[in-house]
Image (cartoon, rainbow, N blue to C red):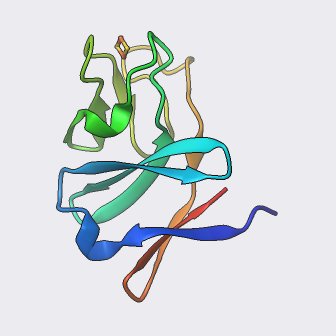
């Protein structure tokens, strides 16, 4: 089973913000939405934009380039959930935000 890695502190992300973090060679977008933390692949499967810079609302991030929308809780493309990007477990330990990967 993959380990949890501390990727940032709780106070590093305001509600509605995202941040790109690296675990090994993987780039992961961590988001805070409505007090919850989420982690999905950072790279948009359309043309490779960084999803951490997208607009976050109601459990969905909208890609900053062409507005594809992905669900934060499972990485599914909101407009066609058969297409999915990877989603990672997140936990908060004290002030540490930890992602499993
Ligand atoms: S690169 Fe994300 S929608 Fe085009």
Q: Quadrant of the N terminus?
A: bottom right
| Snapshot quadrant of residue 55 | top left
At 49% from the left and 42% from the top, the residue drawn is: 40
Instruction: Give x and y (percent) for residue 27.
Output: 54, 42
Instruction: Give x and y (percent) for residue 77.
Output: 44, 22
Instruction: Give x and y (percent) for residue 94.
Output: 41, 89
- Residue positioned most to the bottom: 94
Residue 94 higher or lower than 85, as above or below: below
Residue 5 higher or lower than 76, as above or below: below
At 49% from the left and 21% from the top, the residue drawn is: 81
Judge from the rendering whether residue 93 lies leftward or rightward of residue 62; answer left or right: right
- Total marks in image: 0
Residue 34 higher or lower than 93, as above or below: above
At 25% from the left and 62% from the top, the residue drawn is: 13
Instruction: Give x and y (percent) for residue 20.
Output: 41, 46
Ligand 1's quadrant: top left
Judge from the rendering whether residue 49 lies leftward or rightward of residue 84; answer left or right: left
Residue 9 higher or lower than 23, as above or below: below
Instruction: Compare residues 74 and 18 and report the one nearer the observer.
Output: 18
| Snapshot quadrant of residue 96 | bottom left
At 56% from the left and 18% from the top, the residue drawn is: 82
Q: Quadrant of the C terminus?
A: bottom right
| Snapshot quadrant of residue 66 | top left
């Amino acid at each position: 089973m993959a380990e949890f890695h501390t990727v940032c502190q709780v106070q590093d992300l305001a509600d509605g913000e995202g941040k790109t973090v690296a675990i090994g060679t993987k780039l992961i977008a961590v988001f805070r939405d409505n007090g919850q933390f989420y982690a999905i692949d950072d790279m948009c499967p359309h043309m490779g934009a960084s999803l951490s810079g997208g607009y976050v609302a109601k459990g969905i991030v909208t890609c900053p380039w062409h507005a594809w929308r992905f669900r934060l809780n499972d990485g599914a493309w909101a407009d066609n959930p058969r297409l999915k990007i990877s989603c990672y477990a997140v936990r908060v330990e004290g002030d540490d935000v930890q992602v499993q990967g």
